[in-house]
Amino acid sequence: MTLTSPEKLARFYQLIDTARPPQRADRSAGGLLPTRAFRFCEAVTTASAFGWYVFPPMSFSLIWTGEQIAWTFDGTDDWITLGRAQFPGFSDLFDDAAPDSARGFAPPFLAALPEPGVVQVWSGLLARTAPDWSLLLRAPANLPRAGYDLFEGIVETDRWFGPLFTNVRLTRTDTPVTFDADYPLFQAQPLHRSHYADDRLNDFSVKCGLDELQPEDWAAYGKIAVHPGDAAARQLGHDAAEVRRRRRADSSD
């Protein structure tokens, strides 16, 4: 059963008022892309801008001893052993607003998972997408991070209306890893369900050897890699300009 369609491709419900709301991902990766990549590499800037940045609802730090995980945040001087933790004050606000059937079921902000060094982090959001559209939750494209990795997941948010979270895998021990409320925690990218269906993804082939390249393949390769002249002779940013020209032409059709 599909939930009621939102008016937009995606709709985010921000349950924690003090959190930074999601925003469109940035072609410059928040200004952190090298200047040459931003100016001349359309592949990198397109990937950087694909989707929306999702931020943690507060700044906090985690530390992993190799056996236990603890956390801390502004307003406390202590490290608190992590099992499951609510966002400060949120559970009372949730229960005041929720119907009787949902009281006591506020999503935890942080939860230490059974896997070593893995923490589930809730963004403070719920999300809903248009019919047949899902959200790929992944590490922010082309943004650096230190001390942790993110698991990727595809959530069918047209059917599943629950907490929008990510799973963080800490990659170093005995050193605090800090998450900033103004730095993207993950990137949510829209995917049509048909694009990751097995019949679509199983529809591929592999051809081995140079003799598999047909004349039209060589012509296409030559247009990109040979003409006009070698790479040093080509105008810097030629490929990026060509991609942008094609997009303008497509949008005007």
Image: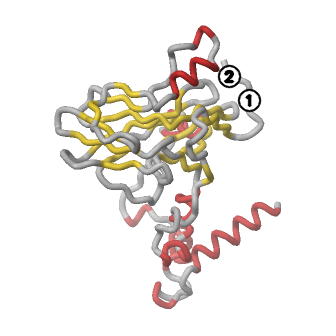
Image position of 51 (left or right of 2): left
- In which quadrant of the rendered view does residue 127 lie? top right
Q: Give the residue type at disc 2.
A: Thr
* Rendered location of residue 121, percent (x, y): 42, 36
Give the secondary structure at mark 1.
loop
Q: Give the residue type at disc 1.
A: Ser
* Rendered location of residue 63, percent (x, y): 26, 42
Towards the viewer: 14 or 231: 14
Image quadrant holding the N terminus, namely top right
Badge number at residue 5:
1
Give the secondary structure at mark 2.
loop
Towards the viewer: 113 or 7: 113
Q: Are marks 2 and 1 in contact (CB under 8 Å)?
A: yes
Residue at 56% of width from left, 76% of height from top? 39
Towards the viewer: 127 or 199: 127
Taking 102 as reference, is 243 above or below it?
below
- The residue identified by callout 2 is 2
* Rendered location of residue 16, percent (x, y): 57, 35
Residue at 57% of width from left, 22% of height from top? 94
